Image (cartoon, helix red, strand yellow):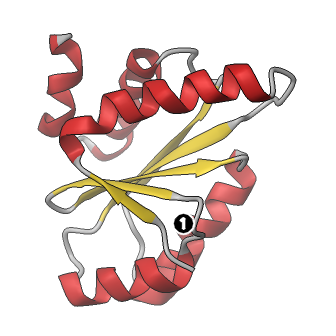
Amino acid sequence: MAGVHFGFDNFRQFLDLSIGLAQRVDESRAESFTLLYCDFSAVEQSVIDSSLEQILRNSDAIVNSDSDYFFLLPYTDKYGTKIVKNMFEEFFARDLNSSMVSYPVDGESSRALIEELANNISATYKKDLKCLESFNLY
């Protein structure tokens, strides 16, 4: 297993593509994908790399900005995404600051999903993700 890593500069376009595919391929799914945010700031990069190889599926996508990691998990609801988060926590032997949103339940556009995710993180962890501010520029 291993997820596919995408550059942060293309994150919004990747979300837009995923939404377009979900709309075209399977309109009836309640949760076509879930976006998981995890703060890996307290974890060494070599340990992060090892965890990504062992935990993620080939169909999962990874985007990060420094220690802020975003995972797009196709055809995975929030229950399944919580299992993935728990696997990371077990691997690192520590709790993680995390949040998740699902398409289309929590938003029907990349902007709506990112805003919901950022609001959840800000409210829960009192942390502003400056890296997400670029989403409001276009």
Residue 44 in the figure: left or right of residue 36: left
Asked if residue 98 is positioned above or below residue 119 in the image, the reply reads below
Residue found farthest to the top: 138
Task: Give amino acid for label 1.
Answer: Lys
Q: Residue at x 35, y 60 (%)?
A: 5
Q: Quadrant of residue 71?
A: bottom left
Q: Residue 64: which quarter of the image? A: bottom left
Task: Say whether residue 36 is left or right of residue 102.
Answer: left
- Mark 1 element type: helix
Identify the residue position indicated by label 1 in the image: 85
Q: Quarter-wise, where is residue 21 in the image?
A: top right
Residue 110: image x %, image y %? Answer: 43, 21
**Location of residue 25 with respect to 43 vertically, above or below:** above
Question: Is residue 128 visible to the viewer in this orientation of the structure?
Answer: no
Count residues near mark 1 (Cα–Cα under 10 Å), then give few for <14, some for 14-19, many for 20+. Answer: many
Q: Position of residue 11 (x, y in %)?
A: 31, 37
Marks counted in the figure total 1
**The C terminus lies in which quarter of the figure?**
top left
Q: Residue at x 33, y 29 (%)?
A: 12
Give me the residue at 71% from left, 21% from top.
24
Front residue (pair 131, 138): 138
Residue 76 visible, this angle: yes
- Residue at 57% across / 80% down in the picture? 1
Q: Position of residue 99 (x, y in %)?
A: 46, 47
Q: Is residue 11 left or right of residue 92?
A: left
Is residue 111 shown above or below 131?
A: above
Residue 94 in the image: state x and y as whole percent: 40, 81
Above or below residue 87? Residue 33 is above
